[in-house]
Amino acid sequence: MLIPRRFQRTSVALSVLLIFFLLDIRIVFCVINLGAEVFCNRLPGLTQKQREMCKTSPDAMVAVGDGIRLATEECKYQFRHHRWNCTGIENPSSFGHVVVVGSREAAFTYAISSAGVAYAVTASCARGNISACGCAPGPKMREPGPSGWKWGGCSVDINYGIRFARKFMDAREFEGDERSLMNLHNNKAGRKAVKLNLFTECKCHGVSGSCTMKTCWKTLPNFRQVGDSLMKKYYKAKPVAATSAQPGPRGLDAQRKPKKVNLVLKKGRIPVKKMPKKSELVFLQMSPNYCERDLASGSLGTVGRACNRTSKGMNGCNMMCCGRGYNTHQFTKTEQCRCKFHWCCEVTCDTCSEKTEEYTCK
Ligand SMILES: *[C@@H]1O[C@H](CO)[C@@H](O)[C@H](O)[C@H]1NC(C)=O
Ligand SMILES: *[C@@H]1O[C@H](CO)[C@@H](O)[C@H](O)[C@H]1NC(C)=O
Ligand SMILES: *[C@@H]1O[C@H](CO)[C@@H](O)[C@H](O)[C@H]1NC(C)=O
């Protein structure tokens, strides 16, 4: 059977994701004790390089699994009001389809996944759970800060997390075609978003709480903040096209040096000679409207999705249902109400019932 190359690759990528969802972390730990060699050889879908990384740092693989899970949860949260709602990222058949189209949604998926891995590995280092890393000295540790504070304590080793995520997540993008360039770019933007969202925490020293001396360190934000910042980038994602960066060398050299392929921004449909910023998300193809079910383009359709009748946003019934209309479901909610406290110690409540309606797309 002929399987397009792109699809072969995405199925490899998905089985990597899938394995982390299916394997309980405790089982992973157990298997690691049995031998990283055996464990890593049996994990399906890893590239050769990923398998080697697995063998040299099996403890970091647990964090990779955590990171992917974290990223999936965050993606679902961020897209809960959208037609495309991240469903199927953990489901092999539909994740494959999402990834097939080089859309904005694919850009977000890649960025949040590599952010999740960089984040989880960094967090795991700080907990002392990965032998190869731990705390990082704060930036310019010896220099006292401006107002009597200095770097100290345990700053998170974000550079280790980022390096690990880069090696591991980028390892599957080896083709050098426009789609791998897109994925690599978005992976990098995702990792960068973690670093940009680090914040500084400080502790005061001094007589009875006077803050004559402060020790400060860098710490990880809540992953929600990373998700929020990548969501902003999703809205501002830039269309790109692959092209050779400069006109290649002429004459004899032209045969010897292959032209380097780069991504450049597009104005309308025309590629312009300008590279996207490293922090921006980029996409190659316009997204489908996700109204109808069309697995070939990664769309599950919105039939049966809950919508909000009064909202003017993406989750409003008009937008969500793409003008097909919606079904109204009426039901009665009963709950305890008018609760009174009697001395001592009894609470009595009435039962109230309330009619509510819910709407789902036709
Ligand atoms: C490593 O991680 C596990 C599970 O997350 C945790 O229970 C354990 O305390 C961690 N080990 C260290 C040294 O922090
Ligand atoms: C997301 O979309 C899928 C497919 O349309 C649907 O089955 C699922 O219930 C949705 N999830 C949420 C949380 O709305
Ligand atoms: C529906 O949208 C309106 C307006 O945005 C909002 O006030 C209301 O809380 C929403 N209802 C539900 C059930 O989310």
Image (tube, rainbow, N blue to C red):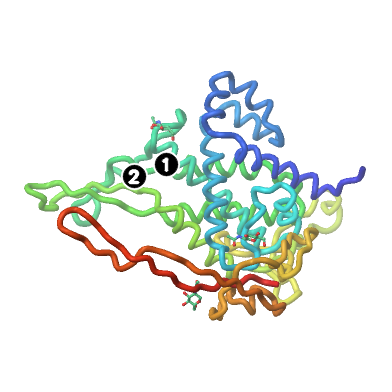
Q: Is residue 171 left or right of residue 166?
A: right
Q: Give the labeled residue for mark 1.
A: 157
For disc 1, the neighbor class at 10 Å (few under 14, some 14 to 19, many from 20) is: many
Q: Is residue 85 left or right of residue 242?
A: left
Q: Amino acid at mark 2?
A: Gly
Q: Is residue 200 visible?
A: yes
Q: Which one is nearer the viewer's eye here, 121 or 170?
A: 121
For disc 2, the neighbor class at 10 Å (few under 14, some 14 to 19, many from 20) is: some
Name above or below for residue 264 compared with residue 252: below
Q: Position of residue 173 (x, y in %)?
A: 70, 46
**Residue 300 sits in which quadrant?**
bottom right
Q: Secondary structure at mark 2?
A: loop
Q: Is residue 87 left or right of residue 258?
A: left
Q: Which mark is residue 6?
A: none
Q: Give the labeled residue for mark 2.
A: 138
Name the residue rendered at 92%, 42% in the picture.
1
Disc nearer the start of the sequence (2/1): 2
Q: Quadrant of the C terminus?
A: bottom right
